[in-house]
Amino acid sequence: MAVLVAKSAPFFHDADKTFPAVLGCGSIVEDFNFKKATAGKYTVVFFYPLDFTFVCPSEIIAFNNRLEEFKARNVELISVSIDSQFTHSAWRNTPVEAGGIGAVGFTMVADVKGEIIRAFDVESEGGVAFRGSFLIDKNGTVQHQVVNNLPLGRNVDEMLRMIDALQFTEEHGEVCPAGWSKGEDGMKPDAAGVASYLAGHAKEL
């Protein structure tokens, strides 16, 4: 499986490549473009195996429940599976209490040819996507990735923490030590910075 960290995210620099999708407003489009949709924003692209399955709706609802937190951080949230745009729409129009996901407010891309899951190298032997999550900066560079096997649901709050860490590093030029959360001390990236941080925080790690 490829490590994409520090590399250009697939399709994020291609103004012409498009995919069918269901937008956050519910509209079905045939020409969703990653580069245009994410211009000037951070992006989280997350993959899941299939619509109308089991772990998947819990993850999608968890992402959607935190949608305003992603927006507050200037993050575009995009999901991808191999289902068609019409299946996405049907799942989105199925109430949560009936096994659907409800009217989620982010784009659901239809990767019916498997181009995206192969480009991000998250295709399982069964042809569906592993539970891959990718944090991509405003320049289209992957800064964080995590890939879970099919039975293992991901932690959406951890992705928010990673966004905070990336934005902190960009703003302050400091690095984020183990377990860092927004509002906590960072570390200057030199020997003196390490010594200073550990002197005050080693017992907390």
Image (cartoon, rainbow, N blue to C red):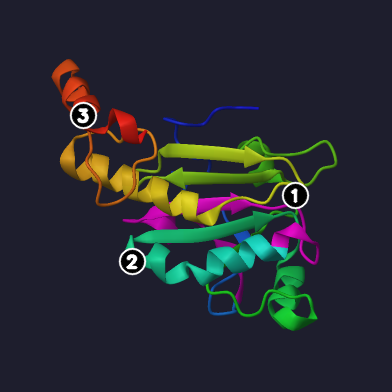
Residue 197, which numbered label?
3
Q: Residue at x 64, y 60 (%)?
A: 59
Residue 10 location, x and y as percent?
53, 40
Please state the extent of the stretch shown in magenta in the rendering: 28-56
Farthest residue in the top direction?
191
* Badge 2 density bin: few <14, some 14–19, many ≥20, Cα 10 Å: few
Which is in the foreground here, disc 1 or disc 2?
Answer: 2
Q: Which residue was labeled with disc 2?
A: 72
Q: Residue at x 71, y 79 (%)?
A: 96
Q: Which residue was labeled with disc 1?
A: 113
Mark 1 → mark 2, Cα distance in angstroms: 33 Å
**Kind of residue indicated by mark 2:** Ala
Residue 50 horizontal side relative to residue 107, left or right: right
Which is in the foreground here, disc 2 or disc 3?
Answer: 3
SS type, badge 3: helix
Answer whether labels 1 and 3 touch (C-beta < 8 Å): no
Mark 1 → mark 3, Cα distance in angstroms: 49 Å
From what the image shows, is residue 174 above or below residue 67?
Answer: above
**Kind of residue indicated by mark 3:** Tyr
